[in-house]
Amino acid sequence: MRKYQHIAQIQFKAQIIYRFDVAMTVVESIGMVLFAWLIWGAIFQTREEVTGFTFGTMLLYYILASFINSLDLSEGISREVSSGIRGGTFSKFLVIPSHPFLHFLAANFGKMGYYLLFIIPTTMLSYLLFGGGLEIGRMSSILLGVTMIFLGLLFMSTYHYFIGLMAFKFQDIGLFLHVQGTVIFFSQGGMLPLTLLPEGVLQVIRFLPFPHVVFTPIMLLMGQLDIREGLLALVILLGWQVLMTLIVERTYKRLRIKYDGVGI
């Protein structure tokens, strides 16, 4: 495992070069909260509450959502893996003593560590600028919410690694990445709190992994979700993580033998 720790450390240090990317992430994070402040500010002028949210708690929801979304760098994995497969540079992972999945996973978490140094003060600044509410759950709910954030980021990294592997089979996955990115962002609760959806739809998507990456941990942190529902969501997300890991391993073993990249 030490080699993967070194990979994470190298990627952490390498992010110093990409200061513009970090700056744009910070701007995007604040912009998301600003957008929510403008839109929901107009809506709450005529009402006190929307599906259990006050204006302050709604802003807090978006502040926390922007924090999690800023940490989710998993889409870069799918783009890097797919471009490596198409360009032939993925060949090195077939010969070096490093598992490709663990390599990209360690690199991604190394990047997250660097981004975290800037996202934490950005989140605090957003809270001070826009004045979100201050509702937090019990310690058990907070610990469960933090655990789900970490597991959710792990799942998204696994999912996007799988999407990147599809380049073994398909020439270009760029359009698919764009379309599925929008759908996933919505189903995570990144655009709107999922409590705004019809109850029937909410009951269906609760068995998908994506709502438990953003929406569920935020509701736990804010104390608006029962701990039993949170535990059920954790089991669902953990099950999806195990399933996706098995799919990734099977897909890689089946498709790598068909790879004709440079040096193979």
Image (spheres, helix red, strand yellow):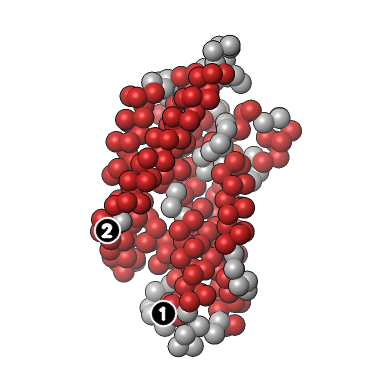
220 with respect to 46 (left or right): left
Asked if residue 231 can be seen in this view, the reply is no
Answer with the quarter of the image where residue 193 lies.
top right
Residue 148 horizontal/vertical position (percent): 48, 42
Residue drawn 54% across the image and 13% down it:
45
The kind of secondary structure element at disc 1 is: helix
Residue drawn 62% across the image and 46% down it:
183
Q: Look at label 2 and name its amino acid.
A: Ile
Give the residue at mark 2. Answer: 17
In the image, residue 209 sits, relative to residue 127, either above or below, namely below
Residue 136 horizontal/vertical position (percent): 42, 24
Give the residue at mark 1. Answer: 92
86 with respect to 21 (left or right): right
Residue 238 horizontal/vertical position (percent): 55, 50
Residue drawn 54% across the image and 65% down it:
164
In the image, residue 153 sits, relative to residue 93, either above or below, namely above
